[in-house]
Amino acid sequence: MSESRVEHISAVATLTDPQRRALFDFVRSSANPVSRDDAATALEVPRSTAAFHLDRLVDEGLLEIEFKRLTGRTGPGSGRPAKLYRAAERELSVSVPPRQYDLAGELLAAAVEQSDRTGRPVRDVLTAVATEAGRDLAARSGGLDAALTSCGYEPQDDGDGGLLLTNCPFHKLATKHSDVICQTNLALLEGVAEASGATDRRVEFVPPTDGHCCVRVVPAKAQDG
């Protein structure tokens, strides 16, 4: 499991505590950053309890803090700045099993934009965009196996020198729009394989079964056999 996915799960799990969730909702619904006293009063809990949960939400990246003098005075005698909490800009999404619908949306939107701009058929552009995205993914991940794991394909050794991708990150889309999504997925992973320099292995399309991905990683020699 990738580090970012672990972090997202941890952050979401933090909100299972009722008081913490209530504090999070209160801060998010407030037009201005709130203090510990504001939060404690709104939820009718001790200030120390509010402070503990607010700081836990900050640690998980769900809230951010700022310091501001609430009296409006400056200089000596104006008092210490208050610690205020506001909603973080960070977006969190956790799915079990892992899904990559945001990535699919980015690829499709980029392809439509380029097609409108250049006049090329959108399917041709989508293949090119997905392949380039795969190259970028391989560069960021450091290799084929790492890229497959980070994207949630859940690769497993097939016993013949290849990999079964036991999870489809685009499952719902692939079920409803299999032609478009599966070909896009193949182009994405071809880009990953190409950029990772995996000369001993290649990717190929296979009919998806039992929730497995429509792409398999096979030994390069299988191309001739």
Image (spheres, helix red, strand yellow):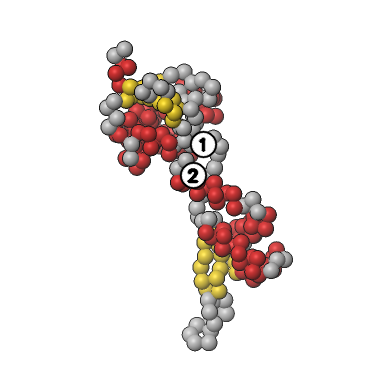
Q: Residue at x 51, y 36 (%)?
A: 98
Residue 113 or 178: which is nearer the viewer?
A: 178
Give x and y (percent) for residue 215: 42, 24
Frontmost residue, 116 versus 183: 183
Residue at position x 59%, y 49% in the image: 13
**Does residue 182 appear in this view?**
no
Give the SS element for disc 2.
helix
- Residue 205 horizontal/vertical position (percent): 40, 20
User: Toward which corner of the image does residue 79 lie, by quadrant?
Assistant: bottom right
The reply to whether residue 21 is visible in this rendering is yes
As drawn, 191 above or below 2 = above
Q: Label 2 sits on what residue type? A: Arg
| 37 lies above or below 59 | below
Tell me if 78 is positioned left or right of 26 in this view.
left
Residue 18 picture quarter: bottom right
User: Looking at the image, how many numbered discs can be counted on the residues?
Assistant: 2
4 displayed left or right of 200: right
CB under 8 Å between callouts 2 and 1? yes
Residue hosting label 2 = 5
Labelled disc at residue 98: 1
Q: Nearer the viewer, residue 84 or 201?
A: 201
Please name the residue shown 45% across and 23% down the image.
214
Q: Residues within 10 Å of mark 1 (few under 14, many from 20)?
A: many
x, y percentage for residue 193?
33, 30
Q: Residue at x 44, y 33 (%)?
A: 108
